[in-house]
Image (cartoon, rainbow, N blue to C red):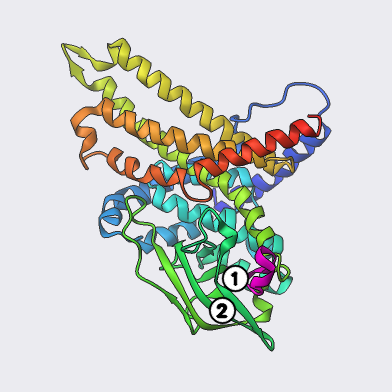
Amino acid sequence: MSFNRISRLCHRHLLRHRQAVRTMSSGLAPAVTQLSEEEQMMKDAAARFAREQIQPLVREMDEKKETDMRVIRGLFDNGFMGVEVEERYGGPESSFFITNLIIEELAKVDPSISVCCDIHNTLITLIFRRYASEELKQKYLPKLVSESVGSFCLSEAQAGTDAFALKLSAKKEGDHYILNGNKLWISNSTFAEVFVVFANVDSSKGYKGITCFVVDAGTPGFTVEKPEDKLGLRASPTCPLTFTDCKIPESNVIGNVGEGYKIAIGSLNEGRIGIGAQMLGLAQGAFDCMFPYVLERRQFDRSIYEFQAVQHMVANLATKLETARVLVYNAARLKENGLPFVKQASMAKYMAGEVATEVTSRSIELMGGVGFTTSYPLEKFYRDCKIGCIYEGTANIQLNTIAKELQREYMAGH
C-alpha cells in the first residue's frame, strides 16, 4: 500500500477519532496505548524503514560523525517528513500521534536520525503551518514535505535554559532586516536548507523584541560553522551559526514582529512530546537488545534469566518503560484532541529521559562485558541518551513547569 493511500486512511481515521472524542458521553474509552489500524500501519512502516535502511549504516555514521544523505532522502520518500502538513501543500495531512510513533520507531535503531525527523516535524513544519503567512506556507511547506530539511535556531552561548536572553540582533532597514550575531547547538545545520531563526529587533523591549525569521541556506552573511564533537548523537550535526550583516526580506518574518517568544514557547511545548518519543524509542531499543541476550546467556548451567535478581531488574525496567510510554502517548493524544497538555508534555519528556538513562545503563550491566563493547548497540544508546535530559528544556526545567502547572490547577479549583 502506498504512503499516500495510508496517509488518506490515517486522515479519515483522525477525523473519526476526534468526532468520537467530542461526542462520546458514555461507554469505555480506548487505552492511550491502543493503536488504530492506520496508526499500526505507519508504526510498522517506520520500523521496517529503520531496520532495512538505517540499521546497516548506524555504526558507520556514528564513527564518521555525519549523516548519510541516503537516509534523509529515504525519510522524505517514505513520507516521514512533514507528516501533518495539509494536502493542499503536498503533505499527507496525517496526525501528531503518528508523527510521534515514527519518531519512536526511528529512535529504536538510531536516535541521531530520529532527532532530525523530530525537529523537522514537531518544530519546523509546525511553525510554518501555525504561524507563517500564506505566502511563506506556499513557498516552503511543499519543499519541507519533499526535499528540504529544516533547522530550529534558538539557543546561543548565553541563551540556553534562559532562552530569551538571546543577543542575535535584527535591525530594520527599509523592507529588510539585517541580522548580526551567533547561534549555538543548532541541529540539522550542515544539511538543512530552511532555518527558522529567532532574533531580537529591539533589545530595549527584552523578550518582547524577539521575532521569528526564515533564513535560506546559502544566504550571504550566513555561515554554518564546524560541527561540535559530541558525546552522543554523533551522526546528527550540531553546529554554531554566524550571521554577519545577513540581509533578510521583511516578508520572511514568521508571525508578528515581537512575538517570536510566543512561537518558541508554543512550538517547544509540542516538541517536548517528540523528545519524549525519541527517548522512549531509544530505551526500548536498548531493552530489545538486552532481553534476548539475558534469556540466552548461560552461567552455572542455566540461563541467567532464571536468577530472580535478574528477573527483578528486567521487570523493573519493563515497568518503567511502560510508564514512559503511557505518559508520552497520553500527552500526544491530549495535544491531538485540542486538550490542555503542557503539564503532561513536561512529564512525558522528563520521565522518558530518566527512563532512557536507567534502561541503557542497567542493560549494559545485565549484558556484562559484551555490553561495554561496540559489538552491540548498547554503548551507543548509552552515549545518546544523556541529551534527553538536556535539550528542549532540561530535566529541572520540566520539573519547574510541572510544579507551576500543579499550582495553577490547584488555584483554579481543579
Q: Amino acid at mark 2?
A: Leu
Q: Which mark is residue 199?
A: 1
Residue 86 visible in the picture: no
Residue drawn at x 57%, y 44% as measured from the top left: 273
Give residue 234's quadrant in the image: bottom left
For the C terminus, the image quarter is: top right
Q: Which residue is mark 2?
A: 179
- Residue drawn at the location 56% of the way across and 65% of the way down: 166
Q: Looking at this view, is 247 or 332 the one in front?
A: 247
- Does the magenta run of residues contain 170? no
- The stretch in magenta equals 198-212
Q: Is residue 82 above or below residue 334?
A: below
Residue drawn at x 33%, y 44% as measured from the top left: 383
Residue 6 visible to an observer of this rendering: yes
In the displayed structure, 325 sits above or below 255; it is above
Q: CA distance from mark 2 to mark 1?
A: 8 Å
Q: Is residue 238 left or right of residue 200?
A: left
Label located before the other in sequence (2 or 1): 2
Q: Which amino acid, mark 1?
A: Ala
Residue 57 at x, y = what percent? 30, 53
Asked whether the beta carbons under mark 2 and mark 1 sit within 8 Å of each other, the answer is yes
**Label 1 environment density (alpha carbons within 10 Å; few <14, some 14–19, many ≥20):** many
Q: Is residue 209 magenta?
A: yes
